[in-house]
Structure formats: C-alpha cells, structure tokens
Image: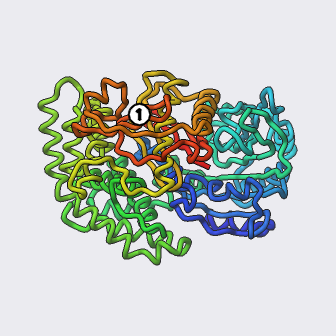
Amino acid sequence: MNLKDEFIKYFVEHGHVEIPSAPLIPENDPTVLFNTAGMQPLIPYLLGEPHPKGKRLCDAQKCVRLTDLDEIGDKTHHTFFEMLGNWSLGDYFKKESIHYSFEFLTKILNIPIERLAVTVFEGNNDIPRDDTSAEIWKSLGIPEERIAYLGVEDNFWIAGDSGPCGGDTEIFYFRSKDEIPAKFDPEDDRWVEIWNNVFMEFHKDESGKITELSQKNVDTGMGLERVVAVLEGVTDNYQTSIWKEMIEAIEKVSKKTYEGNEISMRIIADHIRTSVFISADPAGIKPSNTDQGYILRRLIRRAIRHAKKLGIDMTANWMEPIALEVIKKYENYYKEIKDNKEVVLEVLKNESVKFNRTLEKGLKEFDKMLNHLNGNIIDKDNAFKLYDTYGFPIELTEEMAKEHNLKVDMEGFKEKFQAHQELSRTASKGKFKGGLMGHSEIETKYHTATHLLNAALKIVVGKDVHQKGSNINEERMRFDFSCDHKLSDEEKQKVEDLVNTWIKEDLPVTMTTMSKEEAIQSGAEAMFIEKYADIVNVYKIGEVSLEICGGPHVEHTNLLGHFKITKEEASSAGVRRIKAILE
C-alpha cells in the first residue's frame, strides 16, 4: 500500500480537490527560509481569501524543518518530510473532520481502534473545553479513558500572537509490543502522535480579545514518514520502505552495514534527501554562505563528514548513487525533481569537491587545536579559522566540539563573522564604508527604522540591550539584540508603539562627521566599534537615537510609514531576533 496515494484517493472520493505541493522555498514570505507545514502556503485562504479550487482541499506538502537538526541521527527525526493534509475552508467542521480521520485510519489503513487514543483542548478562561470533539470521539468508540484534555501548550493553535486560532484534537497510536494500557497517558512515549486536526473557530485580536469566526476552518496534518513506520511495524523510521534503497546505497558505497553505523547513515540519508529537494526547487538555490544556500551547504558538508567517518572514498563521486535513489523515489510525484536532475547532481558534486579539498586539512587543524586549548572552549579565532580557511560551517565545529565535551565561543565567532561580512561587502569599493550603499528607497527606510527599534528596546527592555546584527531586504527588516528573555506581548506592543510615536513626531535625521574618539565620548552607539575607520559618520534622530553608522538614512521619520513587529524569536543564547515590516 502506498500511504500517500491512498490518502489523496480517500479525500478526493470525499469531495476534496487535490492541490499540488507548494515549492519548498516560500514565494512571498521572507520571514522563513522554507515551508515548514502543509498549512503555511494556505494562510491567505485560511484568513478568508477564496481558494480557486474550492472549499475542500487535500495535498502532500514538501516541508523542511531545522528546529530539530541536532536530533537528526535518531530514529524519528528528519529535516525534509512530507505532510499529508486535508482542509475545509468554511465548509465542514469538527464532526466530518473527525469522522474522516477515524474512517481513514480504521477502515482504509486497518489500524485497530484499541491502539488509538486522542487529546482535545481542555479550555481556558476565554474558550470553553472542547466537549464537542470529545463526544464525537466517544460516539465512534473511543472510550473516555483514552481521551486526554490538555491545555494551550499542547492542544491550541494560533499563527503568531493574533489571528485565527482554535483548539485541536491529536490522534495517537500505541507503538509497542507491550500490553496496551486501558488509560491513555500522553506522557507515555509508547503513544506516538500520528495526526493533528486543528479547528480554527476563533479570532484573537492584538489586545487578546477572543471572538468567534464567521468562517470556521479545519486544517489537518499527518506526517508521512511517521505513519509509514507505524504501518510497517518498525520503531526506526529509517528501516521503512521510504528509506530502504537510500540506506542500501550508503551500505554499498561505504562497504559497511546499517547495523552498528546507524547514526552516520541516518544523517547521510536524511541530509542528501533534503539537499536533493532544496537544489531541485524552482528558486534555484545553490550552496552559499547566506540563507537557504547556507543550509544547503551545511547539510551537504555534514553528510560528507559522516561519510568520512564511515571510511567512504572521498575522491569517488559517492553521493550520486544515493541521490539517484532519492530522485527515482520522488520524480513521479514532484516534477522539479525530474526536470532538475542534472542540476541536483552537479550541485552535490561541486560542493563535495570544494569541501574535500580542505576537509582533511581542517580536521588536522581541529585536532591540533585540541592540543592547545585554554580550558574547554574553542576560541573565536580558531572557530573563525575553521570557517574561513577550511570551509567548516560553525555548526559543524560546534558538533565536533560537542563530541569532545567542548564548547565554542559563539559570541566571539559572530563578532568576527559580522566584521568579515562588512569587509567583504565593501572590498570591491576599494575603501572601508558602511555596507548599505546603493540600497533601494524601502531598504533605506528599514535601515533608519533599525535605529528607532534599537532605541525603543533600550527604553522598554533595558539600557543594556545592544544590537547584535541586522539583515534588511525590500520585504522586511531583521534585528538581533542582546536579551536574556522572550519578550512579553506587552513589551512588544510598547516597543511598536514607541517606534510609531517617533515616526509620527517626524523627527529630523541628521549626520555629523567626527573622529571615532569624539563619537564615543558623545555617547554614540556602535555595534562593533573596531570595524570603523578613524573618522566616522554619527546619525542623530531627534533626541532618541545617536549611532555611528555608514548609512544611508531618510531625512525625517514620518517618511517611514507604520512600523509593525511580525515575529520575535530566539536567535542564539542570550540573543533575541525581531522581524518587522513598514506598512
């Protein structure tokens, strides 16, 4: 049985229209590098925009998630995966959705009902307990003791801080040869989540007020790899039919068996599969040192290091036979895999050749460093040398350090890395300038807005907040800052309001040229003071901001429009990241 085909067939027979998977690289969302869930490309339609294919949809969506990258190598995690989903956009709701899921699992996949359990939303001060879903499950034969009522952390969905939201019901399968307990305990790892049905029936506004939606939606997601493992009766996802040919190809090129070499073989299989999909995407991603290209480079180089650990001949084109198995498995489902086959193979080969040139030397350099360590930390100079001279992504250095119970000076590395980027940007101009010359009008506005954001954070969060980096394009701004906690909704709102107040006040933006020493004495802030020449430009915005900067900036603040924070998240230890737009 092919689970993907059976899923699509079932839902098409029940009035759904199959839609093609969106590309891996989001087309109009610069806030994320990859599509991470089946729901993501459908957000406009979940918000009420009519979908050209109607109100009932189903698909298999290609996804890449990097949140669990450190877990790759265990039995269940993957960077690339396929999410099977069915949606109702204001059509059917809880009863039909639960009936469809139950029928598909028990009648089409023949999963015994005694191996199933469910969770539902327990409710809170704003939203009542989801007794409707619980009663539907009971009517289908799921006993009360197999239903767990859980809170917001487990069984409630909202995209960000405001917008459509609602409780969900999650379906679990007992994956063990042990006797099945009568009572379902969601903390018991033998129960594995296999399907999630989200019921978007409310709207939460920015003040936290909850109202009922006029268009109620259903959004479901079933992880293909996990459910195939359940159906095939294995606890190691990599021993399913999905991975069979890829693992066999790795065994062949390494002349070793999967047993005893599981971790490296899983990493190689996972990373090559993901690399095939990223490099085949219509966006034309190539290995690089930024954004999706950096992820692609990092995955390929990590696979190469584990291939070396297995003793694979680094001079042979060893990735090709593994990649060809990936292509063979997926080319009938995803046209771009077939169309871009040669591009994919070329990307893997070129990156392999590039990294192999320095890998051996880099590993020797790393071993040398181990003998001259000061304490248990790899300092910023050595970490940057491995990156700059030997092409080791910093995460690879971190991983190798971890294997030796060592740490890496990440803050120091980031300082050196950002100074290096600044130099790289300006080298072609033959002199040292700020790295934003020649930017578009909107990027100039975003750059000015980073100064206001920095000033607002110092007032709302604390004077010890300092900029740690920024990234600007025509779509949005990204701003990293030192902070030891996740910002509360109240803090975010205060920051946003403060920036918009300054924009409305139409503050003048002025620039003065002075010596670096004078600038520091005047109280001007700079991210990395050592990167600036002896004579600097100091930008002043009203009485709220004073910063050493290379420019460019708008002349007064009311040209900026309305400032809106779209996301606040962790960037690294002790560093938070804000993404924002100007409307």
- Crowding around mark 1 (Cα neighbors within 10 Å: few <14, some 14 to 19, many 20+) is many
Q: Is residue 76 visible?
A: no
Residue toward you, 162 or 4? 162
Image spot of residue 509 (x, y percent): 47, 40
Relative to 345, say whether 404 is above or below. above
Q: Is residue 161 above or below residue 15?
A: above
Element class at badge 1: strand
**Residue 533 drawn above or below residue 233:** above
Q: Is residue 299 left or right of residue 488?
A: left
Looking at the picture, which amino acid does disc 1 mark? Gln
Left or right, residue 106 beside residue 384: right
Placement of the N terminus among the 4 image quadrants: bottom right
Q: Quadrant of residue 179?
A: top right
- Of residues 427 and 265, the one drawn nearer to the viewer in this rendering: 427
Q: Name the spot of residue 72 as percent of width and height, x first.
A: 42, 46
Q: Using the image, determine if residue 466 lies above or below residue 113.
A: above
Residue at image location 55% in from the left, 24% down from the top = 460
Q: In front: 192, or 330?
A: 330
Q: Between residues 452 and 35, which one lies in front from this camera angle?
A: 452
For the point 78% across and 67% down, the residue is: 54
Taking the spot 37% from the left edge, 76% from the top edge, the residue there is 342
Q: Which residue is mark 1?
A: 467
Tell me where residue 254 appears, x and y as whole percent.
Answer: 27, 59
Relative to 155, 247 lies left or right: left
